Amino acid sequence: MKGSELYSRYRSRRIHLLGAISVALLLTILISLSLGAVSIGLKELLRILLGGGDGMERAIVWEMRMPRVTMAILGGACLALSGAAIQGILRNPLASPFTLGVASASGFGAALAITLGAGLIGWGRYLIVTNAFTFALLASAIAYGVARLKGASSNSMILSGVAVMYLFSSLTSILQYLGMREDVHAVVFWLMGSLNGMRWWKVGAVFIAFVLSAPILISKSWEMNAMLSGDEVAMSLGVDVKRLRLISTALSSLMTATVISFTGTIGFIGLVAPHIARLLIGAEHSLLFPTSALTGALLLLGADTISRLLLAPSEIPIGITTSLIGIPFFLYLLMRRGRR
């Protein structure tokens, strides 16, 4: 068999796998929309989605469940895509946007707004969101700026990101120590993450961040592939390594900051979803990016569905659920690969 035929069969198998993940995501969407405090049958759900159905059930689906489901899909896709990009440019399996201190800085911004009512920009009920978003981007800028002084190598970016992460974590701890009991409770709840109370304008903001960032990252797939062999090899192939790192860091930080400013900290998806995608489909970025996005959407939506159904009417914080269901699956895939 010719090499071109082998490569064609290789891509065909991977694309079929992409289709299987898409089908699983579609089924999870239907389950998530139909189950809840008011259960809606599949036939009635389809009737509602086509514009018919009972008025109250239509309001439940379109005004309460659909924004939450859409945010889970977009949020999971953004976090996973960001993780795949950061792992690619840093060539580190433990890297994610949170490695650059995004989560801890975002948590500090939210804690600052909750405990002191202070922030860099924003006002009123929007102060938590704008603070979390601003400090998340600020953390990435600091981590990249410090690393740039040392040549912006992958190691210097990781080390500067870890330093920024500990800095903002310490500042958050100080605010929690000084804050009133109810404020501390609110900060802890925010840090655990939640998709409760999503609205279409929040979904729209995440959608804009995804549409602005994903096509650019996917267009850099070939350069990302070259980076896998090291900075020197990539540069010898004509890749501007520093520019690629800057673009990837900026877009990944934008997507992550937008998502967690509305949902709170959901760190597990960005780290693990790219690994699961890589185990399923390989390291070629033109396939890895879309597979990571679909995997992240599936993981976050599945976790959110379990979070709100397992102890209904109470709700488990989404950050806890993503870890509980994702880590065993991730370990299973690692052991399965190790036996091959």
Image: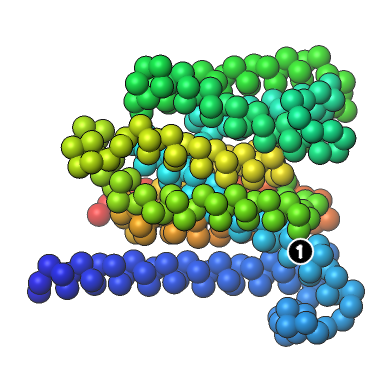
Q: Percent x, y for residue 214?
A: 49, 53
From the viewer's perspective, is residue 43 above or below residue 335? below
Q: Residue at x 31, y 54 (%)?
A: 284
- Which residue is found at the position 90% from the left and 74% from the top? 56
- Does any portion of residue 140 appear in the rendered image? yes
Please state the horizontal and vertical placement of residue 13, each as a whole percent of the image.
31, 70
Q: Position of residue 47 (x, y in %)?
A: 75, 84
The chosen color scheme is rainbow
The relative height of residue 201 versus residue 152 in the rendered view (above or below) is below
Q: Which quarter shows the N terminus?
A: bottom left
Task: Write down the residue under mark 1.
Answer: 65
In this picture, residue 309 sits left or right of residue 145: right
Crowd band around label 1 with a 10 angstrom C-alpha radius: few (<14), some (14–19), many (20+): many
Q: Which quarter of the rendering shows the C terminus? A: bottom left
Position of 305 with respect to 89 (left or right) is: right
Q: Residue at the location (56% across, 56% down)? A: 211
**From what the image shows, is residue 310 above or below residue 61?**
above
Horizontally, residue 164 falls left or right of residue 230, namely: right
Residue 299 visible, this orientation? no
Q: Please name the amino acid that badge 1 sits on.
A: Arg
Q: How far across and how far down the image is residue 249, in percent?
A: 47, 36
Question: Which of these two is toward me, 147 or 24?
Answer: 147
Element carrying mark 1: helix
Which image quadrant is residue 199 in?
Answer: bottom right
Total number of numbered labels?
1
Q: Give the quadrant of residue 108.
A: top right
